[in-house]
Amino acid sequence: MDALKKLQERNNKHSNHKRNSIWSVVWGLCLLSPLFVSSGLEFYHSFKGLTFEALHPAVVLLAIFGFGFPLAFMGDLILLNRPAKFLLLVIAECWFIWFWVVTPLSWLAFLPLVPTYIWVKIQLSKNKL
């Protein structure tokens, strides 16, 4: 009986680890989505014969580091369940893609970092009891 309990605990740990690794892949792909969209738009416009002045992929990658990683780290501190965090991340990434890749308003693309930072500061101050 004791062996069955140990096996059940190991199975639970393994399924939790597997679920966490799947979520990590999903977060990573979501954070890299501006790079995919930028490359996809450039590819699409090249076949139509139009000139699309896309940013260099290295610039988009640097912007992902400046936007996506701080957003992901702050999002990890927000006290919500994973699907709600993911939905907020998708909304923020869509905002970023629209203002960074599609329209040339790069300063407006980083705007979601401000309310996220304020939200994290409010939650951390309430939880310090």
Image: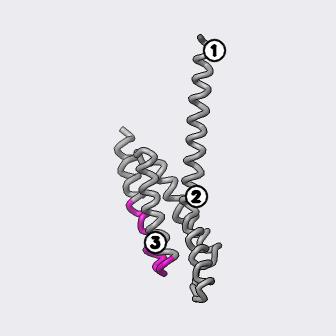
Labels 1 and 2 touching (C-beta < 8 A):
no
Q: What whole-number distance in Å separates the C-alpha atoms at marks 1 and 2?
A: 39 Å
Q: Can you give x and y, in whole percent of width and height, for residue 17 in the image?
A: 60, 37
Say what amino acid the circle numbered 1 marks.
Ala
| Residue, far top | 1
Q: Can you give x and y, in whole percent of width and height, for residue 41 in the image?
A: 56, 77
Q: Tell me which label, 2 or 3, sits earlier in the chain.
A: 2
Say what amino acid the circle numbered 2 marks.
Leu
In this image, 97 relative to 21: left or right? left
Q: Disc 2 vs disc 3: which is toward the camera?
A: 2
Label 1 secondary element: helix
Residue under label 2: 29
Q: What whole-number distance in Å separates the C-alpha atoms at marks 3 and 1?
A: 54 Å
Q: Quadrant of residue 111?
A: bottom left
Residue under label 1: 3
Say what amino acid the circle numbered 3 marks.
Ala
Q: How many other residues sit within 10 Å of disc 3, few (<14), some (14-19) or many (≥20)?
A: many
Residue under label 3: 109
Magenta stretch holds residue 107: yes
Label 2 secondary element: helix
**What residue range appears in magenta?**
102-115
Residue 116 vertical position relative to residue 58 in the rendered view, above or below: above
Q: What whole-number distance in Å separates the C-alpha atoms at marks 2 and 3?
A: 19 Å
Query: 39 or 125, which is in the foreground?
Result: 39
Q: Can you give x and y, in whole percent of width and height, for residue 69 in the image?
A: 55, 59
Q: Can you give x and y, in whole percent of width and height, for residue 65 in the image?
A: 58, 64
Q: Residue at x 62, y 26 (%)?
A: 10
Magenta stretch holds residue 51: no
Residue 83 vertical position relative to residue 36 in the rendered view, above or below: above
Q: Residue at x 46, y 60 (%)?
A: 90
Q: Tell me which label, 3 or 1, sits earlier in the chain.
A: 1
